Amino acid sequence: TEGISAISFVGFDNFKGLLESVSFRLAAMNTLKFNLISVPFILMLSLAIALLLNSRLKYISVFKSLFILPLVIPVASIVLVWQILFGDYGAINGILNACNIETVDWLNSSWSFFILVSLYVWKNCGYNIILFIAGLNSIPLDYYEAANIDGAGRLKRFLKITVPYLIPTGFFVFIISIINSFKVFREAYLLAGSYPHQDIYMLQHFMNNNFDNLNYQRLSTAAFLIVSLIVILVFFLFSFEERYGMNFRN
């Protein structure tokens, strides 16, 4: 169809127009870039912290509470803190100004992308840590004791025992992280509005703006394309885990 006008079959014209749209290509590339950087980073960081918290160190419970805290704080409150830190007259620019260093427009420059990544990681890292700790606690201690008797070092125990048994947990955390990365629109919108700096203009911005402009044909086409790609990705990941996960653990 062509918007809210009379119904007529247009074939693949809507898809062609969507793929030729500069704003859609920008949003798609930014979303892909965000996923490629933030998802692997949060996976490695949350696993490293989970391994640390799972060890018997002093005051571990305090650190666990600190990492879980972002889960119970409203998104608007978190974004407000980031605005206080990175705003034009925020704390970081105040420190730079006090040191006679040129201030930076953090939210309207290429730095905005890394600010959004840090916000995403801080907000979602705690949940991933909980999942990884649960996965670590499910590994039988007998395997580690047997490995110690055989003279296996820490790295070998990690690669041969911890990693294989964390594959199901890691796979689930990976899927959750991708889903949460698509929900980062809330943070980006609250930080910079409907038309932010081009480095943090995501697919959700594109769809929200087309909805506001009543461009329903482009909105529905983009939604269909995105959902199709997500379904294909999830199907591929589940197939990969089912085919290779058990063999790797064995």
Image (cartoon, rainbow, N blue to C red):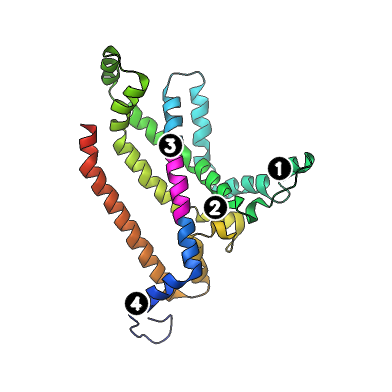
Instruction: Answer whether residue 101 is magenta in the image.
Output: no
User: Which marked residue is nearer to the observer: mark 2 or mark 3?
Assistant: 3
| Residue 73, percent from left and from top | 54, 43
| Local SS, label 3 | helix
State the CA–CA distance, disc 3 to disc 1: 29 Å
Q: What stretch is highlighted in magenta?
A: 32-44
List the residue tagged with mark 1. 91
Q: Which amino acid does label 2 sit on?
A: Glu
Outermost residue to the top: 149
Count neighbours of disc 1 (C-alpha within 10 A) and say few if under 14, some if 14 to 19, many if 20 or more.
some
Q: Which amino acid does label 3 sit on?
A: Met
Q: Which of 214 and 244 is in front in this view?
A: 244
Q: Please tell me which residue is depicted at 59% across the width and 52% down the height of the picture.
A: 112
Residue 130 shows in the view: yes
| Local SS, label 2 | helix
Q: What residue type is labelled 4?
A: Phe
State the CA–CA distance, disc 2 to disc 3: 22 Å
- Which SS does the magenta portion mostly show? helix
User: Which marked residue is nearer to the observer: mark 4 or mark 1?
Assistant: 4
Q: Which of the labelled discs sits on residue 44, or is there none?
A: 3
| Residue 126, percent from left and from top | 47, 37
List the residue tagged with mark 2. 187
State the CA–CA distance, disc 1 to disc 2: 19 Å
Q: Between disc 3 and disc 4, whose residue precedes?
A: 4
Classify residue 11 by image quadrant: bottom left
State the CA–CA distance, disc 3 to disc 4: 41 Å
